[in-house]
Image (cartoon, rainbow, N blue to C red):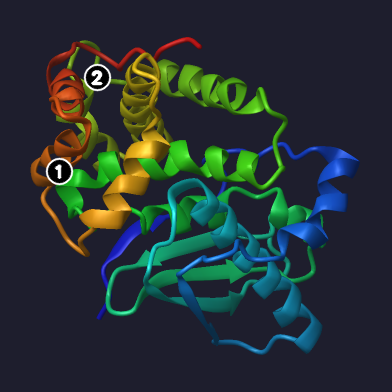
Amino acid sequence: MFRSASLRWPGLLPHAVHGGVLALLLVAALAIPAPGAAASLRYDWQDRFERDDRLRLQRWIDATQAGLERLVGPLDLELRVQMRRHDRAREPVPWAQTLRARPQGVRFHVDPAYPDSAFYGDWTAAHELSHLVLPYLGDGGSWFSEGFASYMQYQVLAEMGMLEPDDPMQVYRRHLDAARAGYPYGERPFARAASSLRRAGRYSVMYWGGAVYFLRVDAALRERHRTLVDVLREYLACCRRDHDRLDDLVARLDGLTGDRLFSRELQRMRSEPGFPRWPER
């Protein structure tokens, strides 16, 4: 059996806006994996796909994984990529799920009728693969895990050349404004309300409220001439586990920065009234 840590539900979030003609020209180059990328991807085609569709879908996932590893370093994992067909879908990837058994990986439901540009401009693969940078934190840590993947999805797409350099913060701000407007719990601290958001099906609000944590941490690190990506590189090199408790993970990240930055921001998410405020930069 597997544990699912992330579900992509249709219509929650708009797709990333990719760079038009430039993005299309980049597709072939993006299919080349990053040198030294350590994740070993094992493909499992669970429905019938034409050979050409298999090749182009594999290039898309390989390119996304390579973009992620250029940011945070090699994952050093064997990852299974399960592919299921979803014909006549309203979008290229109507559903996906992170798999946390051994080997870990992602199950994708895809409509191969869509062109390459639609897959490369979609955020789903970047989101789901990013989950595998951090350990499985259980249901109680889902707001943290989903916030991380939501933050990372646009970092990965930007790394792949699918967003203009200044686009990620603009895209974040649009999602964050919508999430704040949809937060139904008044002054209740976000982390205390996250389980209620999940039960109520307000997934987008939970995802983007969680992403604020990582925007805050990254902004604080940049004041010290570091970035969140720098810390993630160190974490993958020394400390990644398949499963962990949220507070233990945060303590490990604190150890890499030499102070309690990650813990302080976690406490803010648990105690600050209302939907969390994000840094403007």
**Nearest the camera: 71 or 64?**
71
Residue 229 locus on image (x, y percent): 41, 38
- Residue at the disc numbered 2: 185
* Element on which disc 1 rests: helix
Residue 111 locus on image (x, y percent): 69, 68
Q: Residue at x 58, y 53 (%)?
A: 67
Identified by mark 2, the residue type is Tyr
Q: From what the image shows, is residue 36 above or below residue 203?
A: below
First in sequence: mark 1 vs mark 2: 2
Q: Are marks 1 and 2 in contact (CB under 8 Å)?
A: no
- Drawn side of residue 212 relative to residue 269, left or right: right
Q: How far apart are labels 1 and 2 at the CA level?
A: 31 Å
**Nearest the camera: 55 or 5?**
55
Q: How many marks?
A: 2
Q: Which mark is residue 252?
A: 1
Q: From what the image shows, is residue 254 above or below residue 110?
A: above
Q: Is residue 94 visible?
A: no
Q: Is residue 38 visible?
A: yes
Q: From what the image shows, is residue 3 above or below residue 264?
A: below
Residue 270 locus on image (x, y percent): 14, 23
**Nearest the camera: 266 or 254?**
254
* Element on which disc 2 rests: loop
Circle 2 residues within 10 Å: few <14, some 14–19, many ≥20? some
Residue 161 locus on image (x, y percent): 71, 43
Q: Residue at x 52, y 61 (%)?
A: 95
Dividing the image into 4 quarters, which one contains the N terminus? Answer: bottom left
- Drawn side of residue 36 relative to residue 17, left or right: left
Identified by mark 1, the residue type is Arg
Q: Residue at x 34, y 34 (%)?
A: 206
Query: Which of labels 1 and 2 is toward the front?
Result: 1
